[in-house]
Amino acid sequence: MIALRRPDGREKQLRPESLLAAGFLAVILLGTVLLALPAAARTGRSIGLFDSLFTATSAVCVTGLVAVDTGTTFSLFGQAVLLALIQVGGLGFMVFATMILGMLGRKLSLKGRMLVRESMNGASLSGLSGLARLYLLLSLGIESAGTLLLSLRFVPLFGWKRGLWMALFHAVSAFCNAGFDLFGRFASLTAFSGDPLVLLSVAALVILGGLGFSVILETLRNRQGFRALSLHARIVLLLTPALLIAGTGFFLLAERGNAATLAGQGAGGRALNAFFQSVTLRTAGFNSIDQSALRDSSKLFSSLLMAVGASPASTGGGIKTTTVAVLFFLMRSVVRGEGEVNAARRRLSGDTARRALVVAALFMTVLLAGTLTIALIEDGRFSLADILFEASSAMGTVGVSAIGTPNLRTASRAVLLPMMFLGRVGPLTLAVALARRQGSLRAASKYPEERIMIG
């Protein structure tokens, strides 16, 4: 734990999960101050503290919901601040903290190493500085490749200087699953709905960012085939394409007759945009079709995909793919009457199953509470499907909107603030807290057993 000295001289122990949340909060507050500066706005006038706080929270939590139009509101300085916040939020506060301590010649304490290990999904307490450096280099390499691909389209459109900046900004925003764009008028990538180079490049960055650094590294190092990978990596690599294919198929079916989304395009365009829609709901936040024009069935399905989100130790949010997989394995074991939770000839610990249940239950509780609160505040101004879509986008740190976030009342946007924060930091800190307690549980008193009827 980290010790803080109170005014009375006594020390207060700060738990690792509290430090993690506090670190993200500190970055958000710093970003709020910088974005509120007159220099951050094109007009030279501050956008105000609340809009700055909302934008900084969305950037650090890599959500992408915006209170003001990013492309037309912020100056180059403001855009650079946003880019830095997205990078720190996407890679994780602890990765940068570890790098800074390493450069200063400082060593992490045991509790600090435990925190970094959990936040980066590492297996060992040793070599974490090197692992953080590897994560950073891997991210910069992928983002550089994405910048190069996007510059092939953006440089001819915007010129060298502006084109390279646009390519860099959107490559980082895509890999970090943030969804911020600079095209203005809340257009996102709708102008490129027929451009495979832009959509597929962004989609590849989003998918790689959502896999998780540990999975990418393990896959690159593996020389013995798919079966030699860890169970975690195999689940991620199987479930990710399964969700993408299922999403693509659903949107092709549900929106086939909707002229405002897919019906007005050729077969190739429909497939491309249905695939991109499935990708972006994995917490990316970009959109190539009008989200407000989606049918209610598509909005509900989109909300489910946003709740699932990306994978652990990635740049994305949501409940996470592995959590959903563990819940499936748990359900299967109960239906079969098995005493243990098994998956791919491996036995999952009871602690893993309990953590999955708690993370999913808390996530859904906050999501439903936020949805109902916003519905009460808006008082019939928007449909429940649109409000659930918006709340899922915030909680899953996605960033797409069918309402247009600025159209919400200020109180509703205030509700979205903690949802974005909890969606990014909450599951992670909860996982760290539960992992910290794992193995340190003391033998509890055993009470008489009694059954409760279920179902």
Image (cartoon, rainbow, N blue to C red):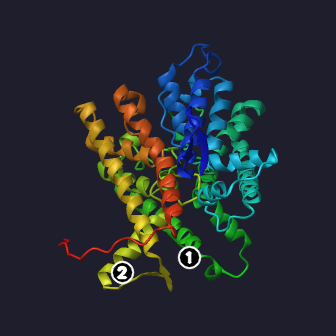
Residue 333: give its label: 2
Q: Residues within 10 Å of mark 2 (few under 14, many from 20)?
A: some
Seen in the picture, residue 133 relative to 440 is either above or below; the reply is: above
Three-letter code for the amino acid on which mark 1 is drawn: Leu
Helix or strand or loop: what does disc 1 sit on? Answer: helix
Above or below, 380 relative to 219:
above
Q: Residue at x 53, y 57 (%)?
A: 432
User: In this figure, which residue is indicated by the disc labeled 1?
Assistant: 231
Q: Position of residue 340 (x, y in %)?
A: 40, 82
- How far apart are labels 1 and 2 at the CA level? 17 Å
Residue 237 falls in image quadrant? bottom right
Residue 282 position in % (x across, y down): 49, 54
What residue is at 61 percent from the left and 45 percent from the top? 3
Viewer-side residue, 96 vs 446? 446
Give SS at disc 2. helix
| Mark 1 or mark 2: whose residue is earlier in sequence | 1
Decide if residue 82 is on the left or right side of residue 433.
right
Who's the residue at 30% across and 85% down the image?
A: 337
In the foreground, 347 or 305: 347
Q: x and y percent of residue 59 in the render? A: 56, 38
Amino acid marked by disc 2:
Ser
